[in-house]
Image (tube, rainbow, N blue to C red):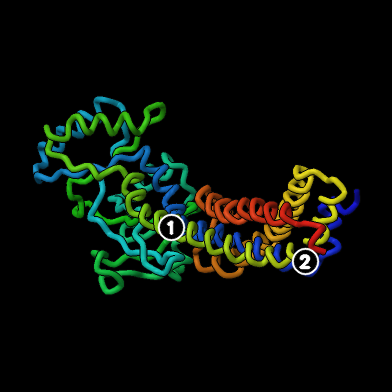
Amino acid sequence: MKPFSAIYFVRENKTRCILLMFMLFLGYAAYLGGLYVTNVRDNWELPISYYQRVVRVNDISGDKENFDRFLEEVEESGKAIILKNGSFNAFNWNSIMGFENGQASLTFLTVQDFKTYCEAMGITCDFGNLKSGSMVMSERFAKNVGMKIGDKVDKDYDENIFREFSLDATTKEDGYFLYFITEEEDYLLNVILISKEGVSGEEVYEFVRERKEKYNLYVPDDLEELIHSQVKPFHIIYTFIIVLLAVIMAVTVNAAFIGMYQRRNFEFAVYRAIGVSKKEIIKKIVKELLCMDGIAVIIGGGIFFLALYLFNNLALYPVGKYLRYFHPLALFGALLCNLGVLLPLMVTRSRQMLKADICEY
């Protein structure tokens, strides 16, 4: 029977259905919100992968002889490459959420040490102009803070810069990275250990932990856990807002559909009078709602991702920012809003139409 076709219903009620599909499309606001709140965590994915191979170790006693004995043990173990680090220098980048954020920053004592680090981590960089006093940052970082090759920074630029540096190269890393090359006298019993080929970063971490008390060492907390603990509140707030949005959308869209289906009481009363089963009536309503939702999701998704692509390329990439196109939390938020609207609609509209009685007309 043609009237039982979901496509037929949508085609015969274009204006109303377009309005209702637009309301269903608003679920993409939840998806965009998920991309937004997870953006800060996304920017730390590459640094976290680096720090699965890199262990930062500091001597907190100031005993150089003691620290040298520890480094000798590292050498003898053959587990890691040792690179000495200088004083910590750093400044922040601007996040898409409107606040400044820290980053992975290292100070190397020589150009060769920096080259060794890049080779080990697979980083592409032009080393030709590097020297003591050089600063290197990822291209995204440079765009984010508006810096170009030749620009200089010192303590006036940021209190965490301890001498003048000039930006002499950029790297092709997918994230915000900052490197400095300074002089030997800046060495403060601070090293990074890079796991060698065939050795996992966890093995190096365990090696250091076993000697932590013996040599009075400081090893920073696990970076992934640290970042997770800092972004977790954003995820909790987002989940609360999405649940609230799903409830609001469910009430609003359901109210709009009440009017639409009230106009069809006679239609469904006729179906019941001619013997159409309750199961067939429910199936018809479910198919109509799924059809409208499917059109809203597919066409709306095309519009949404095209808009996101243009926004990234025209507005965000030029200033060293971006939004990912997918994140599980964003998908969860969109599904929660969509199902939070769709399932109550199926139940309430089915109950409404099953009450239609031909005797009332």
- Residue 301: x, y in percent? 67, 57
Left or right, 34 with respect to 116, comes to right
Residue at the far bottom: name it. 156
The residue that label 1 is drawn on is 240
Left or right, 38 with respect to 271, comes to left
**Residue 267: quarter of image:** bottom right
Determine whether 259 is above or below 44 in the image. below
Marks 2/1: CA distance? 36 Å
Left or right, 270 with respect to 127, comes to right
In this orientation, which residue lies closer to the viewer: 152 or 281?
Answer: 281
In this orientation, which residue lies closer to the viewer: 87 or 35?
Answer: 35
- Residue 129: x, y in percent? 42, 58
Q: Secondary structure at mark 2?
A: loop
**Residue 310: quarter of image:** bottom right
Which residue corresponds to the image point at 87% horizontal and 54% vertical from the top-left?
A: 3
Q: Amino acid at mark 2?
A: Arg
**Residue 202 disc label:** none
Q: Secondary structure at mark 1?
A: helix
Residue at the far front: name it. 359
Whether pointer 2 and pointer 1 mark residues with C-beta atoms closer than 8 Å, the reply is: no
- Residue 353: x, y in percent? 73, 55
Q: Which of the two marks, 2 or 1, is nearer to us in this view?
A: 2
In this orientation, which residue lies closer to the viewer: 281 or 321?
Answer: 281
Q: Amino acid at mark 1?
A: Phe
Residue 214 seen in the figure: yes
Which residue corresponds to the image point at 60% horizontal and 66% vertical from the top-left?
A: 252
Quadrant of the image for the C terminus? Answer: bottom right
**Label 1 packing within 10 angstroms: few (<14), some (14-19), many (20+):** few
Residue 126 seen in the figure: no
The residue that label 2 is drawn on is 263
